[in-house]
Image: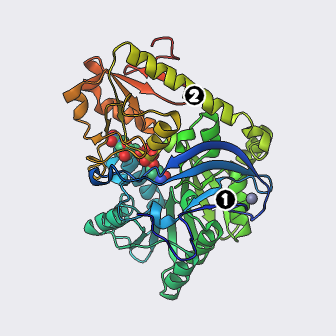
């Protein structure tokens, strides 16, 4: 099952140097223990087979302020033919991407002679909007299923990883882009500097790279520790991003704050420097709050352990009252949460998810079965732990009938609490 890849003696490597600046001043700030791969859902026929588990440790670089995991997993294991994530199963994500594309087409007067490239283009959830507008596009994504789904809806896609070498090939073919999208991929690349150099090569002189990343400050402030898993090698502050781009001849000129995925940044990166106030202001905020210094992370591990204790206490209390429990969202972050907190099939009867590629499989580690959302009204669990808490509004609207019939949600972070269709504070109500 574990494939040996040249130059990768084993599936796992412990880093001793920073992924961005190469420095060796990495200070560990959180250890989530031996963890299965978050998106490696188990199919029924493999249920009895040994499952790979790897250390999952987070460190801060004292030189460039980058927060990163020190455990690198072979990318071919993370994004293989079984990779189950399809962006189009989230209407909110589709609407978010469509609005972004429409704004860029207008702002940059993009037309049939332009070229838009997306890195980690998945199932064409974003590029399809350019295709509909008659603007040439190229998607790049190594995951077989999503890439083929994109091609099936008319989004040309290269099924491969984006590297500096591929960038040089594209440039040689005359494919330099007016706009490069890279959503939720900068954190996923093993060769960060090579990836950014590839971005620079592939961007037209007056082109812009529009990049979305989860924002480190939201992760720490809102205790979103479950968004830490092996696919996410880096956790970005504006300080660390500014250092990374500058070192590779690009400039972070503007940022927008987004609520998606628990709080993200949309970065506007170009080949010439003309920073807007949004950058200066956020760098000043980070300096003032110490996001670029180790002390900011000292209490994180303790606070994460408190969430684990509180969630376990709440769920065991509900169980002891005779309640039945299920969960919503076979998300990667859900795999981190159930394995770190220790939520097994003894506590959670099943997980539901709209993604048909996930249904019928089992959650990594805890092996909890994944069913279609209809199972909530069919089996009527008393409580549902929302693992995809980042889409709570959408899921609550969709599950109105379940909530109206007395079903209740449990929201795990930043503090475990009951949700009955409107937020109820703390645990007291349990
Ligand atoms: O970086 C990544 C982020 C962007 O997406 C990837 N590495 C993997 C993935 O992380 P995740 O799996 O934690 O992401 P989501 O988007 O929070 O996953 C939500 C899950 O919930 C998906 O499997 C889809 C499902 N879902 C659903 O069943 N009903 C989502 C919505 C909105 C719904 O209504
Ligand atoms: Zn560094």
Q: Picture quarter containing residue 397?
A: top left
Secondary structure beneath dot 1 equals: strand
Q: Is residue 276 shown above or below 179?
A: above
Please state which of the two labelled residues, at mark 1 or mark 2, is closer to the viewer: 2
Quadrant location, the N terminus = bottom left
Mark pair 1, 2: CA separation: 37 Å
Residue 194 on image: x %, y %: 62, 72
Q: Is residue 260 above or below residue 123?
A: above
> Residue at label 1?
253
- Report the residue that reaches farthest toward the left: 378
User: Picture coordinates of residue 317 (x, y %)?
Assistant: 44, 16
Look at 44% across and 20% down and name the residue there: 316
Left or right: where 317 falls relative to 286: left
- Give ligand 2's quarter of the image: bottom right
Q: Position of residue 326 (x, y in %)?
A: 34, 30
In depth, the one of 202 and 193 nearer the eye is: 193
**Residue 375 in sight:** yes
Q: Relative to 277, is 173 on the left or the right?
A: left
- The residue sitting at 22% across, 35% down in the picture is 374
Q: Secondary structure at mark 2?
A: helix
Label 2: which residue? Answer: 307
Judge: label 1 CB < 8 Å from ligand 2.
no
- Of marks 1 and 2, which one's residue comes earlier in the chain? 1
Mark 1 Cα shell of 10 Å, populated few (<14), some (14-19), many (≥20): many
Indicate the position of residue 241 as horizontal and vertical percent values.
Answer: 68, 57
Say if 390 sits above or below 252 in the image.
Answer: above
């Amino acid at each position: 099952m574990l494939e040996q890849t040249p130059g990768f003696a084993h599936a796992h490597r412990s880093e001793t140097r920073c992924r961005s600046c190469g420095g060796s001043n990495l200070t560990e700030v959180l250890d989530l223990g031996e963890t299965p791969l978050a998106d490696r859902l188990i199919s029924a026929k493999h249920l009895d087979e040994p499952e790979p588990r790897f250390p999952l440790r987070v460190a801060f670089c004292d030189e460039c302020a980058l927060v990163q995991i020190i455990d690198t997993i072979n990318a071919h294991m993370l994004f293989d033919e079984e990779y189950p994530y399809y962006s189009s199963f989230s209407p909110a994500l589709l609407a978010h991407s469509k609005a972004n594309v429409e704004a860029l087409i207008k702002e940059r007067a993009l037309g049939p002679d332009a070229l838009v490239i997306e890195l980690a283009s998945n199932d064409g959830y974003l590029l399809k909007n350019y295709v509909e507008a008659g603007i040439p596009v190229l998607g790049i994504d190594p995951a077989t299923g999503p890439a083929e789904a994109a091609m099936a809806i008319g989004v040309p896609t290269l099924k491969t990883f984006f590297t500096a070498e591929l960038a040089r090939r594209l440039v040689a073919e005359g494919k330099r882009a007016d706009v490069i999208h890279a959503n939720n991929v900068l954190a996923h690349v093993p060769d960060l500097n090579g990836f950014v150099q590839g971005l620079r090569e592939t961007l037209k002189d007056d082109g812009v790279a529009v990049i979305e990343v989860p924002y480190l400050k939201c992760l720490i402030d809102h205790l979103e520790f479950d968004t830490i898993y092996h696919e996410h090698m880096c956790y970005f502050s504006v300080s660390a991003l500014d250092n990374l781009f500058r070192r590779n001849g690009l400039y972070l000129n503007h940022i927008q704050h987004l609520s998606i995925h628990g709080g993200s940044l949309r970065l506007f990166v170009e080949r010439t420097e003309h920073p807007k106030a949004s950058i200066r202001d956020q760098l000043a905020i980070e300096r003032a709050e110490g996001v670029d210094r180790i002390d900011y992370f000292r209490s994180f591990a303790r606070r994460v352990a408190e969430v684990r204790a509180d969630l376990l206490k709440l769920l065991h209390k509900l169980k002891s009252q005779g309640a039945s429990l299920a969960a919503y969202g076979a998300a990667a972050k859900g795999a981190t949460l159930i394995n770190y907190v220790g939520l097994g099939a003894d506590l959670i009867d099943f997980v539901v998810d709209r993604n048909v590629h996930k249904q019928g499989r089992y959650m990594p580690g805890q092996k909890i079965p994944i069913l279609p959302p209809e199972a909530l009204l069919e089996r009527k669990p008393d409580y549902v732990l929302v693992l995809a808490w980042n889409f709570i509004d959408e899921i609550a609207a969709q599950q109105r009938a379940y909530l109206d019939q007395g079903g209740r949600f449990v929201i795990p972070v930043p503090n475990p609490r009951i949700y009955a269709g409107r937020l109820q504070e703390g645990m007291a109500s349990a």
